[in-house]
Amino acid sequence: MNEHKKKGIIIVVASFIVALMMTALPLPEWAANWRPAWVAMVLIYWCMALPNKVNIGVAWIAGIIMDVLQGTLLGQNALGLVLLAFITIKVHQRIRMFPLIQQALFVMVLILLYQLMSLWVRGLMGVPPRTWTYWTPAITSMVLWPWLFIILRDIRRKYIVS
């Protein structure tokens, strides 16, 4: 395996590890519901940037790890992340042409879809959300998307991840 490929794999894995750490980071009770969907946003970025390498399999693995990390039903996050990866890979060429504001709106729609899948699974288990703030991660993810996109794009270009 050549040096650029190894470096690229390390960068992608490191970005997912950082996203998982940001997801596990303890927040005050008032801010916990506003936590962005870090893993979903990183997955969306890499599916847009490297659709042939970061795909549904990576989404499934990241989702299972997230399920274990959060203590949710095994496969709950995996199902949502696989759906996000599938949609993003199908339309990645169009999304990449959008300005960052339109990309952020698209990311918000994808995160809402991800949360809807999670809500469906929780509803089947009989555990509905307590308040309307269940939907707020989509808003914070939309607001943070331009910065995350720029940071990951610059890292990808600096380390020649392809």
Image (cartoon, rainbow, N blue to C red):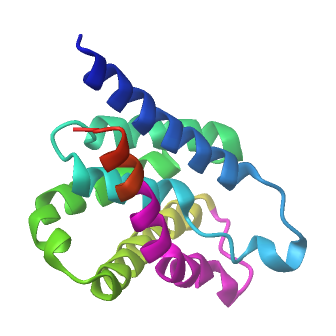
Q: Residue at x 58, y 63 (%)?
A: 122
30 lies left or right of 112: right
- Camera-side residue: 105 or 29? 105
| Quarter placement of the C terminus | top left
Q: Which of 82 and 23 lies nearest the eye of the viewer?
A: 23
Q: Residue at x 23, y 61 (%)?
A: 88
Give coordinates of residue 69: x percent, y percent.
68, 40
* Residue at 45% in and 73% down: 145
Query: Is residue 12 left or right of 130 when viewed as pictured?
Result: left
In the image, is 72 to the left or to the right of 57? right
* Image: 21 above or below 29: above
Left-right relation of 44 to 143: left
Q: How many marks?
A: 0
Q: Compared to 152, does 62 lie above or below?
A: above
Residue 52 higher or lower than 139, as above or below: above
- Across and down, in percent, residue 118 comes to 51, 63
Residue 148 on the magenta span: yes
Image: magenta residue range: 126-152
The front one of 13 and 106 is: 13
Q: Quadrant of residue 96?
A: bottom left
Residue beneath the point at 66% across and 89% down: 132
* Quadrant hosting residue 99: bottom left
Quarter of image, res 111? bottom left
Give the position of the N terminus as an image quadrant.
top left
Residue 73 in view, yes or no: no
Return the residue found at the far top.
Answer: 1
Query: Where is residue 62 shown, x and y percent of the image?
Result: 47, 40
Residue 6 x/y as whole percent: 34, 20
Q: Is residue 133 magenta?
A: yes
Q: Of helix, strand and loop, which mostly describes the magenta segment?
A: helix
